[in-house]
Image (cartoon, rainbow, N blue to C red):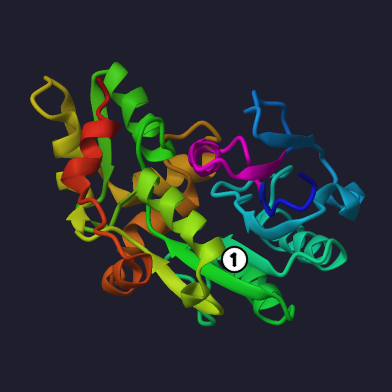
């Protein structure tokens, strides 16, 4: 039994991690699921709860063929800065892979990340990408757009506003999203650990259709009598800078307004299945 290949994943109790773990259970894959906070585990997985990745014993990851690194932060504060969460932790994870003789690492970066990035979130992700690329490990780096599905962060943000009877749209709302369904993401991440087609590639993790933020909100709200209010961008940024409980953080705004999109054709070709459109996604993301 000890020789059965396993998949390790960090961020096991996050949105993508929970959905991936469910798929691994269905596929009867042994998983080693790592998180900072406790969670209910499946019989098919080994749970590791730890705050300091440097203290993980390589022997705990014995027989793992791949590690899927899903830890990341999209909103920065004094105790949770991008450089540490997105970059320093990735360095530690790479070191763990080497010590545990894990040959493949899969990493979720961000759509819009490049060597020319000036945004601190994108810079931290780019630095993490470079650590992985130069590690000597096999790798697949994904650059995801908004990953959506039941209880995804974007939908939860909109739900909170819907409960208050008003949804805010910063600026024009004409900037584009390219949402991808979390079930599709889980299948792709799993395929990545099995197929050499994904080896040493950086791939946009995007859905097949783009949509403006305004239209996405309208489709999500549907026929409900909810007020949709456009707010001045200066006002939105002021709120983000001065109120830690603001609807949208500074980098939420930067990423949304950046209107980052990619091509899903490469992803579909490598994955060998048709991605679901955002209209199909909204059925599972409905606020009702």
What residue is drawn where x is 27% and y is 32%? Answer: 284
Q: Nearer the viewer, residue 5 or 280?
A: 5
Q: Is residue 219 above or below residue 178?
A: above
What residue is drawn where x is 64% and y is 23%? Answer: 40
Q: Quadrant of the C terminus?
A: top left
Q: Nearer the viewer, residue 154 or 258?
A: 154
Left or right for 45, reference 228: right
The magenta-colored residue range is 10-34
Q: Quadrant of residue 199?
A: bottom right
Q: Residue 92: image x %, image y %? A: 80, 60
Q: Residue 67: image x %, image y %? A: 67, 57
Left or right for 217, reference 238: left
- Asked if residue 229 can be seen in this view, the reply is no
Toward the front, the furthest residue is: 1
The residue wearing badge 1 is: 125
- Asked if residue 33 can be seen in this view, the reply is yes
Q: Residue 2: image x %, image y %? A: 80, 47
């Amino acid at each position: 039994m000890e020789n059965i290949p396993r998949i390790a994943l960090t961020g096991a109790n996050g949105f993508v991690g929970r959905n991936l773990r469910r798929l691994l259970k269905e596929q009867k894959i042994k998983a080693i699921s790592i998180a900072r906070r406790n969670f209910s585990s499946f019989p098919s997985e080994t749970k590791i709860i730890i705050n300091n990745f440097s203290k993980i014993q390589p022997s705990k990851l014995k027989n793992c063929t791949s590690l899927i690194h899903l830890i990341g932060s999209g909103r920065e504060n004094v105790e949770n800065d991008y450089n540490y969460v997105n970059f320093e932790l990735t360095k530690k994870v790479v070191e763990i892979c080497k010590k545990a003789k894990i040959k493949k690492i899969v990493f979720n970066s961000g759509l819009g990340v490049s060597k020319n990035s000036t945004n601190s979130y994108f810079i931290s992700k780019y630095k993490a990408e470079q650590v992985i690329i130069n590690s000597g490990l096999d790798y697949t780096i994904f650059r995801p757009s908004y990953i959506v599905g039941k209880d995804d962060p974007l939908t939860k943000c909109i739900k909170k506003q819907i409960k208050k009877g008003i949804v805010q749209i910063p600026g024009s709302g004409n900037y584009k999203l390219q949402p991808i369904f979390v079930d599709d993401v889980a299948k792709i991440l799993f395929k990545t650990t099995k197929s050499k087609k994904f080896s040493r590639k950086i791939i946009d993790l995007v859905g097949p259709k783009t949509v403006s933020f305004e239209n996405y909100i309208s489709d999500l709200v549907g026929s409900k009598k909810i007020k949709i209010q456009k707010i001045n961008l200066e006002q939105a940024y002021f709120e983000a800078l001065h109120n830690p409980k603001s609807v949208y953080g500074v980098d939420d705004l930067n990423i949304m307004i950046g209107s980052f999109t990619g091509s899903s054709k490469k992803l579909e070709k490598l994955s060998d299945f048709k991605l679901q459109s955002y209209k199909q996604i909204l059925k599972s993301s409905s606020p009702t």
